[in-house]
């Protein structure tokens, strides 16, 4: 084997004798060398041609790339110019619209200001008109109030004058009458005053002296009034007390309140009123109608308030007529309901008694049944025990043999053997 080293690449490769001889022979051959040079030149030309073609292709591609890039740049510039022009046009249009809107806004703002001014002027006009109307109403109210106040003042002055006249008259009467006559005169005064307005103000009323002394006491007058249907809606027990100035033992209103309350209760009156001239110098009783806190619905008045108090109490009671009627109807309905409830309770009580009797009998029957069940259970247990004993006896009878019977008894065994019986 020979080794050959390539002079170009330096590669060493082995060859056999024949190959080596051939190569050696070829090397030595000039024709081979020429052929080799020719082929090498052709190969070089081919390679150069191929390289030139590739270079031309690359140059052409590069030129095309430059051309495409230039066109792309030109297209991009054109597009940018178009977009810029469009933007400029849009900006111009928007500026135009904005200017138009500004002008429109200014116009609308001016119109709104004008409308607001007109509305404000209209409101102010209405306010001024309303103020004038209110001022006129206030003036009318003030005038009416002044007229009413003047009329009220005149009435009170007249009442004061009447009161002074009444006081003077009563003082004059007191100086002339004894104690009994003074009291009777006050009663007559009140009766006359009431009868003066009875027909017009109280056509259905009852106002008479209290002559019922069955309870040992009586008041002076009883007042009762009724509606059109005859339903009583107010009742007042009156006591009249007067006193002469010359009387030594002075009485107080408080001294008669307990008896008045008793008379009111016995005669079933709602209100109690003491018409009194006692304690003439008392600021409390001279100021008007005085409510007695010690007793319910009791008042102390001077004679001049006799009719006004009846009017006040009557007007207040008239407002409760419908309520009183409803109360009467409710009492009637309540009576019917109570009657129904009593009947229901009677039925419940009777039913409860029958139920209790039935329940007692039912419980007795249950107890008897329980007793019978217990007795039958005992019989059953006894029968079961008997069956058990019989079964045990039967088992024992079945197990019974001659051998077991003669076990431990040789004599009996011998007897059975002599009789020819096999012992098993």
Image (cartoon, rainbow, N blue to C red):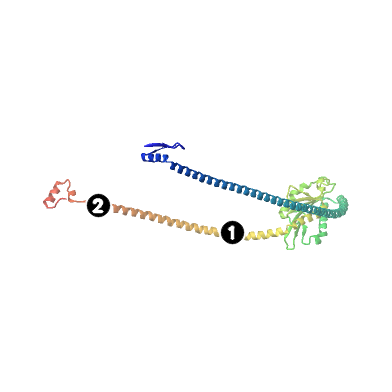
Q: Residue at x 12, y 50 (%)?
A: 417
Above-or-below relation of 5 to 306: above
Give the labeled residue for mark 1.
342
Q: Nearer the viewer, residue 15 or 147?
A: 15
User: How many badges with numbers are in the image?
Assistant: 2
Q: Residue at x 71, y 51 (%)?
A: 85
The label number, if any, that marks residue 107 in the structure image: none
Q: Earlier in the sequence, mark 2 or mark 1?
A: 1
Q: Nearer the viewer, residue 350 or 36?
A: 36
Q: Residue at x 36, y 54 (%)?
A: 377
Q: Nearer the viewer, residue 287 or 41?
A: 41
Q: Residues within 10 Å of mark 2 (few under 14, many from 20)?
A: few
For the N terminus, the quadrant is top left
Give the labeled residue for mark 2.
395
Q: Secondary structure at mark 1?
A: helix
Residue 147, image x, y percentages: 87, 54
Numbered disc in front, either 2 or 1 = 2
Where residue 211 sits, quadrant-wise, is bottom right
Question: Distance from label 2 to label 1 (Cα)?
Answer: 77 Å
Residue 78, image x, y percentages: 68, 50
Q: Secondary structure at mark 2?
A: helix
In the displayed structure image, the side of residue 76 where residue 139 appears, left or right = right
Residue 3, image x, y percentages: 39, 36
In the displayed structure image, the side of residue 274 where residue 72 appears, left or right = left
Above-or-below relation of 384 to 18: below
Q: Are marks 2 and 1 in contact (CB under 8 Å)?
A: no
Which residue ends up furthest to the bottom in the rendered image? 229
Residue 216 visible in rendering:
no
Residue 89 visible in rendering:
yes
Which residue ends up furthest to the left in the rendered image? 418
């Amino acid at each position: 084997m020979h080794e050959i080293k390539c002079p170009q690449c330096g590669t060493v490769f082995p060859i056999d004798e024949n190959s080596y001889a051939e190569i050696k022979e070829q090397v030595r051959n000039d024709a081979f060398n020429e052929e080799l040079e020719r082929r090498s030149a052709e190969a070089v030309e081919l390679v150069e041609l191929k390289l030139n073609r590739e270079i031309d292709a690359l140059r052409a591609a590069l030129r095309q790339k430059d051309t495409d890039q230039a066109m792309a740049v030109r297209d991009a510039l054109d597009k940018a110019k178009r977009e810029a022009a469009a933007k400029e046009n849009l900006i111009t249009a928007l500026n135009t619209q904005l200017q138009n809107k500004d002008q429109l806004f200014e116009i609308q703002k001016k119109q709104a200001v004008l409308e607001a001014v007109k509305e404000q002027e209209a409101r102010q006009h209405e306010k001024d008109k309303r103020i004038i109307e209110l001022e006129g109403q206030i003036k009318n109210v003030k005038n009416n109030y002044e007229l009413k106040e003047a009329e009220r003042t005149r009435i009170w002055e007249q009442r004061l004058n009447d009161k002074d006249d009444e006081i003077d008259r009563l003082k004059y009467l007191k100086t002339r009458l004894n104690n009994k006559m003074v009291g009777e005169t006050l009663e007559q005064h009140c009766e006359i005053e009431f009868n003066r307005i009875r027909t017009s103000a109280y056509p259905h009323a009852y106002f008479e002296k209290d002559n019922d002394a069955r309870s040992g006491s009586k008041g002076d007058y009883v007042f009762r009034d009724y509606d059109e249907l005859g339903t009583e809606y107010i009742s007042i027990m009156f006591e009249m007390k007067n006193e002469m100035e010359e009387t030594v033992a002075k009485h107080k209103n408080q001294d008669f309140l307990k008896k008045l309350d008793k008379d009111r209760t016995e005669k079933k009156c709602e209100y109690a009123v003491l018409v009194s001239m006692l304690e003439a110098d008392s600021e409390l009783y001279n100021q008007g109608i005085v409510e007695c806190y010690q007793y319910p619905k009791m008042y102390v008045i001077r004679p001049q308030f006799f009719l006004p108090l009846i009017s006040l109490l009557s007007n207040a009671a008239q407002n409760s007529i419908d309520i009183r009627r409803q109360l009467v109807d409710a009492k009637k309905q309540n009576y019917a309901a109570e009657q129904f409830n009593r009947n229901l309770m009677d039925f419940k009580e009777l039913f409860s008694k029958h139920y209790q009797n039935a329940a007692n009998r039912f419980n007795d029957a249950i107890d008897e049944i329980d007793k019978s069940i217990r007795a039958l259970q005992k019989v059953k247990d006894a029968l079961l025990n008997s069956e058990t004993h019989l079964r045990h006896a039967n088992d024992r009878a079945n197990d019974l043999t001659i051998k077991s019977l003669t076990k431990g008894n040789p004599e009996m065994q011998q007897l059975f053997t002599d009789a020819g019986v096999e012992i098993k």
